[in-house]
Amino acid sequence: MDLTSIIHMQPGKRGGQPCFIGTRISVNDVLDYLASGMTNDEIIVDFPELTAAHIRAAIECAAP
């Protein structure tokens, strides 16, 4: 997946954290939600601007 098509960093927006394009939701937010036990579906319900592709991108971004 080309992460630059879905994730970007912008100085002054969320402290320069990587965020999903068109949102103020950071990759770390999604990773924290997953770590706390939320499912992909629960995240998408709470944040309808996100899709399963966004969640996959967050995981891929965090993978070494």
Image (tube, rainbow, N blue to C red):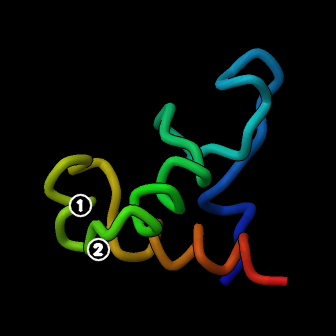
Give the amino acid type for the residue marked by disc 1 in the picture.
Ile
Residue 13 place in picture, x, y as percent = 68, 21
Asked if disc 2 and disc 1 are in contact, CB closer than 8 Å, the reply is: yes
Position of residue 39 measured from the top left corner of the image (x, y, whole percent): 26, 74
Query: Is residue 34 shown left or right of residue 15?
Result: left
Left or right of 25: which side holds 64? right
Residue to which mark 2 is pinned: 40
Q: Quadrant of the N terminus?
A: bottom right
Indicate the quadrant containing the C terminus: top left, top right, bottom left or bottom right: bottom right
Which residue is at 50% across, 31% downward? 24
| In the depicted structure, whether residue 20 falls above or below residue 38 | above
Q: Residue furthest top?
A: 12
Classed neighbour count for the residue bearing mark 2: other residues with Cα under 10 Å, few (<14), some (14–19), many (≥20): some
Name the amino acid, label 2: Asn
Instruction: Give the x, y percent position of residue 41.
Output: 19, 72
- The image shows residue 19 at horizontal and vertical percentages of 62, 44
> Which quarter of the figure has residue 6?
bottom right
How far apart, in angstroms, are the residues tagged by discs 2 and 1? 6 Å
For label 1, the residue is 44
Give the camera-side residue of 3 and 62: 62
Left or right of 33, for residue 22? right
